[in-house]
Amino acid sequence: MEEAATEKITFRGRLAASLRKSPLLGWLIGLTVAVLLEHLVGYELATAVGLPKIPVLFGFVIMLKTPLLIPSALFYVLLIYLIPACLIARLISAPSNWMAERLYRLPISVPVIVHLALLYLILHLWADISAYRGLTLRLTLIAVMMTLSLNLINGYMGEFSCSHPGFMALGAYGASVFSVFFFASDKLFGEALLPEALGAFCFPIGLIFGGLVASLGALAIAIPSFRTRGDYLAIISLAFLFIVKSAIENLEFVGGPRGLSGQPNYATLPVVFAVAVICIWIINNFVRSTIGKALNAVRDDEIAAEAMTVNTRQTKILAFMFGAFWAGVAGGLFAHVLRYVNPGTFGIQKLAEVLAMVYFGGLNSVYGSILGGVSLSLLSEALRPLELFKWIIIPLLLILVMIFRPTGLIAFKEFDVKALIRPKGHPEKEV
Amino acid sequence: MSLLEVVHMSHDFGGLRAVNDYCLAVSPGEIRGLIGPNGAGKTTIFNLITGMYRPTEGDIRFNGESIVGMRPHEIAARGLGRTFQNLQLWRHLTVLEHVMMARYSKLTYGLVGAFFGTPKRHRQEAQSRQRAEELMTLLNVSQFADQLVLNLPYGAQRRVEMARALATEPKILFLDEPTAGMNPEELRQMMKIIRKVHEEFNLAIFLIEHRLRMVMELCDKVQTLVFGEVIAEGTPKEIQNNAQVIEAYLGKETVE
């Protein structure tokens, strides 16, 4: 049936139809080939078409800096990424479908691990080209975690919370203090208490500690939320953000306004990737359970939820603490990626960024949060050469999304891993 | 022993006495009606018993246990289900999710299950889904299972609310004007459904209704409430012929 609908004579229709036959596995393999290609001939191709070096962010930065190089950059992106990825994905659609089907029959964890491993391989090879790519990628993954955890509160539960950067700050400082205190020699805390070799293994404990600190802070918002909603809660949470920020500025033992540095280099790409995957997995598990859907019930009609045996207070506390926990973990990673934190980072600017990601990507949706986090953080990196105009283009984009899709690009959609990795090309089997 | 017992309950809104010295005793499997003109305090009585408000005076006992001061979800979990006068459904949830949500208090898998998707969670959710499917079939809404409630016809939305209330496994069901805004055909259906669930689960039902015909046909006993006070109580026949009730509804016959 699907084929009949797309069986148009147009070239574009045929192209789209033939590309749709490839499963996710095929696309991942195609992209792997593309990034391998970049490793092998990227530099040669770049110099051949007149580019000074391999374009770091798909040529955006180069195109905006020197418009004369637009054709070369486009040519490069086309030749290295687009054509190889599409071509390979299409060419191997038969074997990759066969493979995807084999994997699909195994317990769900096996195909998921295979897909994730491939995805990691792609990201790793891509980021390997330059340190800047690695940094951008890690910050993007952290942005996805922030977006998803804020979506829990603002999207899934429908409360407008403005304190998320505050939770992130609590997590960042919690995790930093943990690792600097125990595993680094530093002016503020003196000699390391434990052998430094142990540090990397204890990093998860530090992250969890940061998350727990953040979720304790979230209690300060959760309890007022029993009585107030909407604007009032937004103001309370905004106040909380300022309290956290000025409290840290005045705490001399964590460096005050000068910030805290000396975090060991624990947050490498594999670590950030793994934590982000765990975060998405756990949050997605949660929002698909009845206990998690209680958040939606509280949002849509609190009185009805209460009358249908849902413990609404516990649900609110849970949403705030759980969201704040992941914001704290993201903050901990953030601090260890930059290896420096200061309270100034966690202000209104950060709040605007993460709110924009949530509402741009889509409320009440894991897909939306991933899309929002990735697209806005890459966009803000790519538009960096425009300097001031960047802050006109991004808000303008947001306004357009709000006009045409008020709940965001992909809102109210369940993140179904099974549907994502399903083999394609057998419409009759897709039930 | 009575299933639900309300003794000398009163409630003030500021200086206004909304409910005065209200008493009620419902036995298991009984259908009771509560009628009265608009603003008499019928819904307030529902909200008091289900824990949305706390009575100023008096006691409410359910299965012999005092439920005054409990949170509404605790009272609901003990077996006191309700529907609302103006449909209160969750606009972004499907019909199946509505009915499964009402089984929230029956789930024991806790946070570990919610976060990590343990086998216990899958078992309980599967059970819950099966029970929800049975209820949806009983109330004739299973064809809408995966649709958002907003897209359903009005009568079906009412039935979803009923299925949701039944999923809490109530011993007594409070129906707040279950036929408000329904056409005669939907009304007939709803009466059939109320009878059906009453028989199927030996459910006690406490009903607020404006349509006297429905009360007369369904209820074992009826109370008439005017300005927060019960002015008459008895079988539907007795109520129908009670002079005070007729006066409250139609006004006094005056010859001038």
Image (cartoon, rainbow, N blue to C red):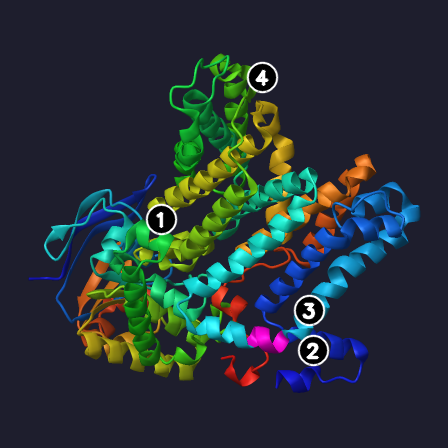
Please tell me whether residue A131 is drawn above or below residue A57 in the rendered image. above
* Of labels 1 and 4, the one closer to you: 4
Residue that carries the numbered disc 3 in the rendered image: A88
Sequence-first tag of 3 and 2: 2
The answer to whether tags 1 and 3 share a subunit is yes
How far apart, in angstroms, are the residues tagged by discs 3 and 2?
A: 15 Å
**Majority SS type along the magenta span:** helix
In the picture, measured across the screen, residue A161 lies left or right of residue A124, that is: left
Sequence-first tag of 1 and 2: 2
The answer to whether tags 3 and 4 share a subunit is yes
Residue A356 versus residue B53: which sits nearer the camera?
A356
Sequence-first tag of 3 and 4: 3
How far apart, in angstroms, are the residues tagged by discs 1 and 3?
A: 51 Å
Residue that carries the numbered disc 4 in the rendered image: A257
Is A95 a magenta residue?
yes
The answer to which image quadrant residue A2 occupies is bottom right
Q: Label 1 sits on what residue type?
A: Thr
Mark 2 Cα-neighbour bin, 10 Å: few <14, some 14–19, many ≥20? some
How far apart, in angstroms, are the residues tagged by discs 1 and 4?
A: 39 Å
Sequence-first tag of 1 and 4: 4
Q: Which mark is residue A17?
A: 2
Q: Which residues are magenta?
A: A93-97
- Whether the residues at callouts 1 and 3 have beta carbons within 8 Å, the answer is no
Q: Secondary structure at mark 3?
A: helix
Residue that carries the numbered disc 1 in the rendered image: A312
Residue A281 in percent (x, y) is at 45, 54
In the picture, measured across the screen, residue A159 lies left or right of residue A56, that is: left
In the picture, measured across the screen, residue B159 lies left or right of residue B24, that is: right
Residue A345 in percent (x, y) is at 61, 28
How far apart, in angstroms, are the residues tagged by discs 1 and 2?
A: 47 Å
Sequence-first tag of 4 and 2: 2
